[in-house]
Amino acid sequence: KRYVRKGVPLEHRARVWMALSGAQAQMDQNPGYYHRLLQGERNPRLEDAIRTDLNRTFPDNVKFRKTTEPCLQKTLYNVLLAYGHHNQGVGYCQGMNFIAGYLILITNNEEESFWLLDALVGRILPDYYSPAMLGLKTDQEVLGELVRAKLPAVGALMERLGVLWTLVVSRWFICLFVDVLPVETVLRIWDCLFNEGSKIIFRVALTLIKQHQEFILEATSIPDICDKFKQITKGSFVMECHTFMQKIFSEPGSLSMATVAKLRESCRARLLAQG
Amino acid sequence: MAQAHRTPQPRAAPSQPRAFKLVLLGSGSVGKSSLALRYVKNDFKNILPTVGCAFFTKVVDVGTASLKLEIWDTAGQEKYHSVCHLYFRGANAALLVYDITRKDSFLKAQQWLKDLEKELHPEEVLVMLVGNKTDLSEEREVTFQEGKEFAESQKLLFMETSAKLNYQVSEVFSAVAQELLQRDDREGQAPQGDAAVALNEGPARQAKCCAH
């Protein structure tokens, strides 16, 4: 755990992620499965949904441009299509394109990217991407509860202004900080995500909020809040990923998986009761 | 201007333009974010899909008055509906955007209208139908006439745009802003008042007499 928290070297990242997440084991136990998913009958609605986003995934990255050879768009398309067939309850959900895109860039391997995506979407994260997105809504409520407990002034402000957490943090959860935080920082977060599970997301979120508490408290309206939550993901604090990673384990205080599980249970029940 | 003895006004002082909430709705990849970006920053680029919700503000001058538009951009993918309907709340205006080269997006806009009417009082929100991507008119699947007829049948405002070529984008927002101000003046009440109060008004709001 200590070593992973200090960052996995880029050249070993793919291997370490595969091992830590159980993706390697899954891949070894299911030889040929990935390729069969791509050979089977295709769901045209799924294909359309994925195609819509291909040109819009990392358009600034040369490797994802249509004109590049070999073009990663095809790889991305395959990984997402295979996943949609594999996990039909989820299919394709916007946000997964960014996650798969990062996985492809790190592994340089289509099949490994698929199994890592499966580890994230199928096991590590709760149901963020299912049609009702209940896991996402739940975790946003959980974050709200954690903020209320650990950073009560911010919690009170959000309540007073009537800001829904989903408004300001959807991207954080759905894209796992891709395109929210700097690339190197995201990769360091994912190192821990694969190793320690989804509570890392709360650590990052709480650290961002705590570090900028005074700044956030200046907000006097919902637009202010939206703007401030955008700004706190920029600047030197998040660029210096080494210090940032140390802070996420010190700043929010203790956060056990048991606490998170309990909060998830109560928030989920509350959401279901609301209908 | 004398600050001291001003009588309390139900709406913000002239120095603070009245704020209106506008939501952008429509299928994925029809150009909602591009319209907002073009309008707010006069820029056009390859935009990443909107996940969740994005937010912009712009102050618009309409004649001598000005108002602040709070533009809420929403995710187009259907999955996000259950998350995004929360953003409808308190909206004063909605742009229902479709892509003129995709019939399905036009049909989807009609569906959005129904959803919107479930959430908000039809009298309460000004809706404009927007057919985007006129720069791709050789691939057009929805004619201007079809868009116009649907808009008229539902009493919506209507325009076609190209965010890419900057065709009629500011016109869309100006038209909405102008109409919002007119409605607001007719009603003589702050747009951000308690929605519950506004809902009770019903036919009484036909009154157009009070000149401001």
Image: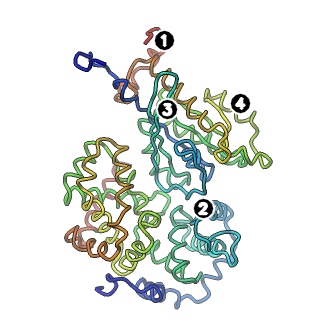
Are the numbered discs 1 and 2 placed on the same chain, yes or no?
no
**Residue at mark 2: chain:** A
Residue denoted by label 2? A56
**Residue at mark 3: chain:** B
Find residue B7 and report its horizontal and vertical position in percent.
Answer: 26, 15
Residue density around tag 4, few if under 14, some if 14–19, many if 20 or more, within 10 Å = few
Residue denoted by label 3? B60
Find residue B123 and report its horizontal and vertical position in percent.
Answer: 50, 25
In front here: A235 or A182? A235
Residue kind at label 2, given as amino acid type: Arg
**Callouts 1 and 3 close, C-beta under 8 Å:** no
Residue denoted by label 4? B149
- Which SS class for mark 1? loop
Quadrant of the rendered image containing residue B91: top left
**Callouts 2 and 3 close, C-beta under 8 Å:** no
Of badges 4 and 3, nearer the viewer stands 3
Q: In terms of sequence position, does the residue under pointer 4 or pointer 1 come before the other? A: 4
In front here: A89 or B169? B169
Residue kind at label 1, given as amino acid type: Lys
Mark 4 vs mark 3, CA separation in Å: 29 Å
Residue kind at label 3, given as amino acid type: Val
